[in-house]
Amino acid sequence: MNTKGHCYPKYIILQAVYFKLRFTLSYGDVEEIMKILVILTFTFLCI
C-alpha cells in the first residue's frame, strides 16, 4: 500500500481501513473511532 503524500502515518491509514472493512462502518464512524484512539493514545503517553 502506497501512502506517500498522505498526512497520516501508514499504520493509522491501515487501522482505519481495517475498521471500515471489518465492521462495515461509515466513514464518519471510522473518523470518530480514530479520533477517540488518538486521544486515548496521547493521554496514555502523557501519564
Image (cartoon, helix red, strand yellow):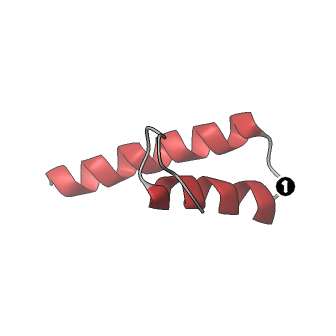
Relative to 16, is 22 on the left or the right?
A: right
Q: Which residue is disc 1 drawn over?
A: 24
Instruction: Identify the residue at horizontal 43%, vertical 38% (top origin).
Output: 7
Instruction: Return the residue nearer the eye: 11 or 44.
Output: 11
Q: Quadrant of the C terminus?
A: bottom left
Placement of 3 over or under 5, stated as above or below: below
Residue drawn 28% across the image and 48% down it: 42
Locate residue 39: give its quadrant.
top left
Q: Compared with residue 9, is residue 21 higher up or lower down, i.e. above or below? A: below
Q: Residue at x 71, y 34 (%)?
A: 28
Q: Quadrant of residue 8?
A: top left
Q: Amino acid at mark 1?
A: Thr
Q: Secondary structure at mark 1?
A: loop
Q: Residue at x 74, y 54 (%)?
A: 20
Residue extending furthest toward the right: 24
Q: Position of residue 32 (x, y in %)?
A: 60, 38
Residues packed near mark 1 inside 10 Å, few (<14), some (14 to 19) or many (20 plus): few
- Which is nearer the eye, 24 or 9? 9
Specify the farthest residue to the top. Answer: 28
**Which quadrant is home to the N terminus?**
bottom right
In this view, the residue in front, 8 or 46, is 8
The picture places residue 44, in percent across and down from the top left corner, at 26, 56
Q: Pinpoint residue 6: horizontal percent, then vertical percent.
A: 48, 40
